Amino acid sequence: MPRPILSAQSDSTVLSLFPAGGITRSQDWLEIADASRQLADSNIYLTSHSSLELRNIADGDAVIERLATTTLHTSPCRVVASPLNSRARELARLIGEAAPESTKDNIVVGVDSGDGLIASHHPHVCVTLIENTTEVRVRVLEHEFRTDIGEAPSAVAEILQYLDANKSAEAQLADAELIDAPLKNSQLPIGWLADHMPSGRVELGVGLFDGVMSAEIAEILGKMEVPVTITPWKGLVLHDLSEGDADAVVRVLAPRGLIFDVNSPFL
């Protein structure tokens, strides 16, 4: 279920949601679009660490009540994953479910597919998949150990409990904003992503100018009925499309301002 976090910023009340691994379902986008129209400013803001926000909220209690009945599953802290790797995304989802409710929302847990992209951001806790094995490597502060992928969610939950209880360890953690280092455009998962897919299937990487999408775009995503991942870099990946469907998506969404060119100056 959703774990919304309300905060008062300089110019408005903001609701933040942390979908673990950035994983969303089509119904989530319909519900978020509706909440944004009724209770916020009709935009959805993708932010760092695969998070999303609703802004300019007039009634915080009403928006929390509205989202409490939705299908969106979120974590109490920020859990990011390699967006093109299904094992990494699924492990991130399980870690998000296991994370203690007391975990501070500025903690960042990363699940790296093994290509080093997530690890390069130095999340507070980093879990790295090891190729051709069920083992993963877990790093926190100056410590590193290996465990089975099935044990990783409980191992990370214990680490998060320790960090919450141990103030001296928590003080050693970098501020979450320091982990929000941008990637070079060439590294972003934007455009036609087919190299890792079976023949005839693609994934479509979508960029958003400053991470902002309208409720209309969110509603279109929901009606497409495809799995969508929010990337750690304020973008989206639409998963497992036929080439024909992917082409149709580009024709519908590109005129509405979504970006499918990794070389775009608006990324």
Image (spheres, rainbow, N blue to C red):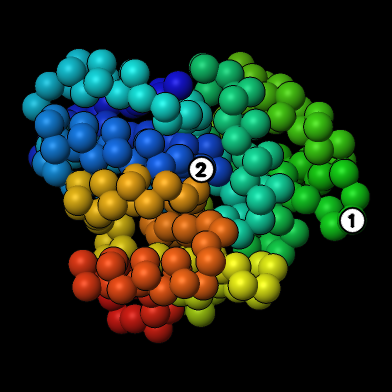
Outermost residue toward the front in this view: 244
Callout 1, which amino acid? Asn
Residue 150's spot in the image, x, y percent?
81, 32
Q: Is residue 216 above or below residue 255?
A: above
Residue at the location (52% across, 62% down)? 241
Residue, disc 1: 132
Q: Earlier in the sequence, mark 1 or mark 2?
A: 2
Query: Is 83 placed above or below 255 here?
Result: above
The answer to whether one can see residue 174 in this image is no
Could you tell me which quadrant the C terminus lies in?
A: bottom left
Circle number at residue 166: none
Q: Is residue 234 visible?
A: yes
- Label 1 crowd (10 A; few <14 / some 14-19 / many >=20): few
User: x, y percentage for residue 168?
Assistant: 61, 26
Q: Which residue does the numbered mark 2 point to in the structure image?
A: 23
Q: The N terminus appears in which quarter of the rendering?
A: top left
Element type at mark 2: strand
Q: CA distance from mark 1 to mark 2?
A: 24 Å
User: In the image, 160: left or right of 205?
Assistant: right
Image spot of residue 213 (x, y percent): 24, 54
Residue at the image point whose x is 20% and y is 35% from the top = 34
Q: Position of residue 148 (x, y in %)?
A: 86, 36
At label 2, counting other C-alpha atoms closer than 10 Å, the crowd grade (few under 14, some 14-19, many 20 or more) is many
Is the residue 153 above or below the residue 251 in the image?
above
Amino acid at pointer 2: Ile
User: In screen coordinates, is 159 left or right of 44?
Assistant: right
